[in-house]
Amino acid sequence: MLEKINEITEFLKTKGVVNPDAGIILGTGLGGLTVKMSNCIEIDYREIPHFPVSTVEGHAGKLIYGDFGKKKIVAMKGRFHYYEGYGPEEVSLSVRVLKYLGIKCLFLSNAAGGVNPAFKIGDIMIITDHISLLPNPLIGPNDDRIGVRFPDMGEAYDNYLIKKALIIAGDLRIRVHKGVYLSTSGPTFETPAEYKYFRIIGADAVGMSTTPEVIVARHMNVPVFAVSIITDLGVEGKIAYTTHQSVLEEAAKTEERMTALMTEMIAAL
Ligand code: HPA
């Protein structure tokens, strides 16, 4: 695995991807953040050795390196999900590569269904913790050069970054919630009984991604900040017919607020 990571990292460095301050993995419909980047180098996932190719509409499959405010970032436009049939190594490879490129911090965004009754469609939830019902990406032999066998997950989402985000959101007058993100495999959206169950066991929002990436980042001691955009509600009496299209549309409506928050977060690094 490390050999593969080094090979990809070297390839990207020869393309000019050097010393990024932060990495950001952009979720469903949130790719628009990259228009605020300048001096960009854009690399299609298909050009990158060993890289899987994302198959989902709304996930472009591009790595974009460039200036974002005064910082250099690598934005991954398109992520890999278990429901696409990828294994743990493929789902987590991009995070490993970001770490070996030198990021100091990983930012993640996703679209999610809100199961907290206080949530509204279009709300932003800062993820403070998670319940991962996906296979753990660290299952298998551990490479001690990369991280420890049994990583602690007591502060998977960096408390300092969460506090910072709350201050920034207040300054920008963006309504945000804090909450627990629960990941399931998908690709089905939940039944009403499943949404209810997830609420009972402690979730505020439900989605199909992010936790494997967070686990892999924490394995390598990379601080993580993640947000969900609430694109639909899994609350009794408020459950509406959900499609990938409706998720994309609702995510797009929140993109501006989300980008503003991420911009200030990265600037404050
Ligand atoms: N469930 C799971 N994943 C999702 C949802 C949902 O309701 N909305 C967006 N992604």
Image: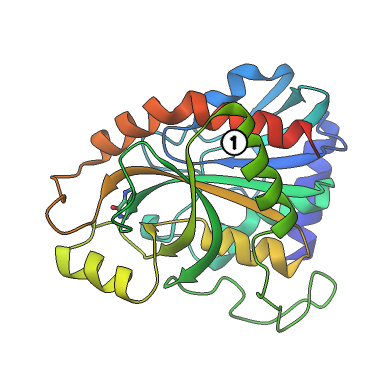
Label 1 residue SS: helix
Q: In this view, does 211 lie to the left or right of 66?
A: left
Instruction: Tell me which residue sits at (50%, 23%) in the image.
Output: 256
Colour setting? rainbow
Residue 258 rendering spot, x and y as whole percentages:
52, 32
Tell me if residue 105 can be seen.
yes
Residue 26: which quarter of the image? top right
Q: In this view, does 37 lie to the left or right of 61?
A: right
Q: Rate crowding at label 1 as few (under 14), some (14 to 19) or many (20 or more) other CA atoms within 10 Å.
A: many
Mark 1 residue type = Ala
Instruction: Tell me which residue sits at (70%, 59%) in the image.
Output: 159
Residue 68 rendering spot, x and y as whole percentages:
74, 24
Tell me if residue 63 can be seen.
no
Residue 59 rendering spot, x and y as whole percentages:
45, 36
Residue 269 rendering spot, x and y as whole percentages:
81, 39
Instruction: Tell me which residue sits at (75%, 24%) in the image.
Output: 66
The correct choice, above or below, for 222 with respect to 269 in the image is below
- Between 49 and 227, the residue placed more toward the observer is 227
Q: Is residue 56 left or right of residue 192?
A: right
Name the residue beneath numbered marker 1. 169
- Between 54 and 228, the residue placed more toward the observer is 228
Residue 157: which quarter of the image? bottom right
For the N terminus, the image quarter is bottom right
- Between 238 and 262, the residue placed more toward the observer is 238
Instruction: Tell me which residue sits at (59%, 17%) in the image.
Output: 35
